[in-house]
Image (tube, rainbow, N blue to C red):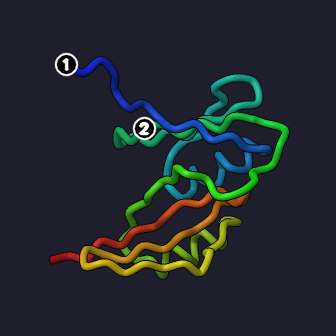
Amino acid sequence: MGTFGRFAGVTIDCQDPRRLADFWSAVLGGGVTESLPGWRRVTVDDGTPVLTFQPVPEPKVGKIRLHLDIAVDDVGEAVDLIVALGGRWTSERHDYPEGAVLVMADPEDNEFCIVEYYKT
């Protein structure tokens, strides 16, 4: 059976699409556009799928079951940058043979991971 689709992006429900798009644009080095009235989209020129931020009235409740993994060169520097941008480190860290994973949260408390892969 052949493929019939391709991964194009991730849409994140949020109360403040502009704020989250600005945050993720700074983290990923992408540009922000308004995809629909009130919506924002972050696009990175390296072929990375787009992130779309959809406005919803309700706040996030509970842990999300899907999250982004962001590869970084240095988790310490990445934590500092993310905190300066309005995110936070949850204090959760996992060390594996292939690298370190830190659980972070964006300004609306959506969890994501930064991953520093060890060079072998």
Residue 49 position, x and y percent, is 42, 38
Q: Tag 2, which secondary structure?
A: loop
Q: CA distance from mark 2 to mark 1?
A: 21 Å
In this image, 30 relative to 119: left or right?
right
Q: Residues within 10 Å of mark 2 (few under 14, many from 20)?
A: some
Specify the amino acid type for callout 2.
Pro
Q: Tag 1, which secondary structure?
A: loop
73 w.r.t. 110: above or below: below
Q: Is there CB contact under 8 Å for labels 2 and 1?
A: no
Specify the amino acid type for callout 1.
Gly
Q: Camera-side residue: 61 or 74?
A: 61
Q: Camera-side residue: 56 or 32?
A: 56
Q: Which residue shows up at 39% across the image and 42% down it? A: 48
> Residue 49 — which label?
2
29 w.r.t. 52: above or below: below
Q: Which residue shows up at 58% across the image and 78% down it? A: 80
Q: How many marks?
A: 2
52 w.r.t. 113: above or below: above
Residue 61 position, x and y percent, is 75, 53
Q: Which residue shows up at 40% across the image and 77% down it? A: 74
